[in-house]
Amino acid sequence: MSSTVETIQPQAPTLPEPNLALWLRQLRAIVAFDMKKNFFGKRSLLVYLLALMPIGLLTLVALLNPNVPNANTLPTIFSVFYNSVILRTIVFFSCAWIFMNLFRGEIVDRSLHYYFLSSVRRELLVTGKYLSGLLTAAIFPDETSGESRILPRLNRYKPILTTDQVYFKTVKPVQATQASHVSHVAADTTSWEQAAAFQLEHLALEGLVHSYVRNDHLELNIPYDFDGAHAYEPDFVVKMTSGLSVLLEVKGFDRYDTARKNQAAYQWVAAVNHWGGLGRWDFVIVHDPQSVAERFKELVRTESRTHREAVSQKP
């Protein structure tokens, strides 16, 4: 009696070829479905309440606080709310609630298994849910205005300072002033700040500049990040007769952090203009102090042209 034994070689399992088009369709479907739940589901109620809380607080202050004489102080109060309530509380807890419920909410609702019953890869499911949470967190703060606006972070004890309180002694070279609220310009160099002040004095005589001040001991600094936290102090603050306030920087040459300083200054100007509590502001950089007068005259021409265009577009 004889017998034969047949051996069968096991074959490696074949993986399905990746289908990029199918993955993209599944990813879009997951993002769209989760976005709908994030905005219209029952779990979105807390985020809406958090987003509306600053408006409600500001409305209560306007209606109930007898110490608010007029609407001009409301932007300052809202800036304090923005710093202490929105940045530190609402943004954090809203984002935490949104991302916490991406999977925990499905587990509580007992609906996570519906995703696992479909032929969707787990990597796509996690990516789609993360993108939906990211988009929801980015859209929720803009629901009332349509666009995110930067607001300044004011000192809660001294939100607005003036040159009336500037008094200090210095060993720096100084130059007397006529159009400044501070008696002298304290210079860091032997000629640059003096030349810029001379140009500003002439612009005051021509009626373009109302007043100006050297940014020294004014506590006006702009925070910026460049390999750590720093504070940037523009050289001058100039008040035009048109009502425009200008941060003037006289820069001889660009340093390694100049671009970051300029970006921070433009963001500061945008925040102050959006706030509206101190009128209109702009930021001007000159690389030659002798060109200060021409640069400010160009600024006045540009502002006048912009104003005429805005008036002509009104119905």
Image (cartoon, rainbow, N blue to C red):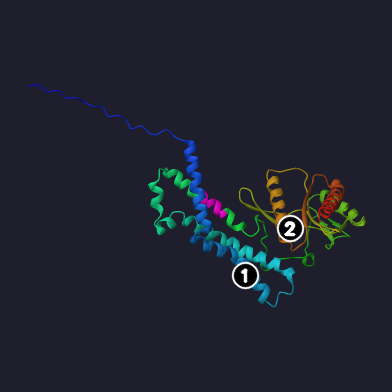
Q: In this orientation, which residue lies closer to the viewer: 65 or 261?
A: 65
Outermost residue on the right side: it is: 206
The residue located at (38%, 47%) in the rendering is 117
Magenta stretch: includes residue 106: no
Q: Does any portion of residue 89 appear in the rendered image?
A: no
- Decide whether residue 135 is among the magenta residues: yes
Q: Nearer the viewer, residue 261 or 77?
A: 77
Please give left or right for residue 67 compared with residue 49 in the image: right
Estimate the x, y position of residue 138 in percent, counting from the top left: 58, 53
Please determine whether, in this image, residue 160 is positioned above or below residue 171: below
Amino acid type at circle 2 is Asn
Most foreground residue, 216 or 305: 305
Q: Which residues are magenta?
A: 131-137
x and y, in percent, of residue 37 in the image: 50, 56
Badge 1 density bin: few <14, some 14–19, many ≥20, Cα 10 Å = some
Question: Where, by quadrant of the figure, is residue 149 drawn?
Answer: bottom right
Task: Name the residue carrying label 1.
Answer: 57
Residue 6: give x, y in percent of width and height.
Answer: 19, 25
Three-letter code, disc 1: Leu
Determine which residue is flagged by label 2.
273
